[in-house]
Amino acid sequence: MRHMIFTALSALLVTASIVEAGHHEENEKLPVIGMGLSVGGESKPLYAGDLSNMKIWEEYIQAHNDRDFEKIASMNAEDFSVVMANGQIVVGSEAQRKTLEGWIQESNTTWEIQWIIPNNAENDEGEMKEWLATGQMLTMTDSEGNTSMEYHLVDVKLDEGKIALGYVASIEYNGSINASQRLEIKDLFLLS
């Protein structure tokens, strides 16, 4: 009987050790999904990020479409900033609100998320930082009913679940478009 208890306890300890070792290795070996350059110019791997971070961006963009500036501000980190595609740097939630209000008043902009890729990267200090690489199709309608579209690529740095920094690049489509042309434009961006 003592032998059976000893064998059972030994098996339990070995199993627990294997499970713990597997868990430890899993954290050390995050999937590498690409590379990036650090501020110091060093090539560093990009790792697969936490998929739950996609929800943050989805809520943030929905708040843009809902014109919920209070929610947008609440989702921003204290040191929020964004570098717009035209080079303008917007610092702080209040400046972002003014920029968005002007943009929406002028062109009644709506955002449609096309894709989100959560990723993690190590900074020059060796700290792992969370990022989202995103693609959005923006539709803008002016006061005369003319529609234009832009495709925005936005790299988003997260800080404790809040939007801390964004880098925006855009591609503009000029002219009126119908539904079939819109699909063609979407397909072009998704395939390239």
Image (tube, grey):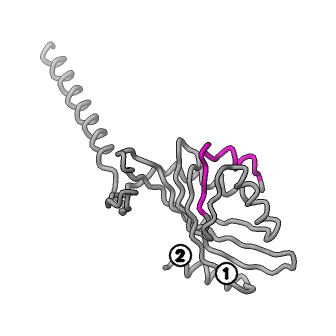
Find residue 127 and report its image quarter: top left
Which numbered tag is attached to residue 190?
2
Check disc 1 and give the amino acid type.
Arg
Left or right: 48 with respect to 95? left
Asked if 188 appears above or below 61 in the picture, the reply is below
Q: Earlier in the sequence, mark 1 or mark 2?
A: 1
Report if residue 154 lies within the magenta region: no
Query: Where residue 176 sits: x, y (%)?
Result: 75, 85
For the N terminus, the quadrant is: top left
What amino acid is labelled 2 in the image? Answer: Leu
Magenta includes 69? yes
Mark drawn on residue 6? none
Which residue is depicted at the point 23% across and 26% down?
12
Which residue occupies the foreground of this view, 127 or 146? 127
Residue under numbered circle 1: 182
Q: Which segment did they paint magenta?
A: 68-83
The residue depicted at 35 percent of the width and 61 percent of the height is: 41
- Is residue 178 positioned above or below 39 on the image? below
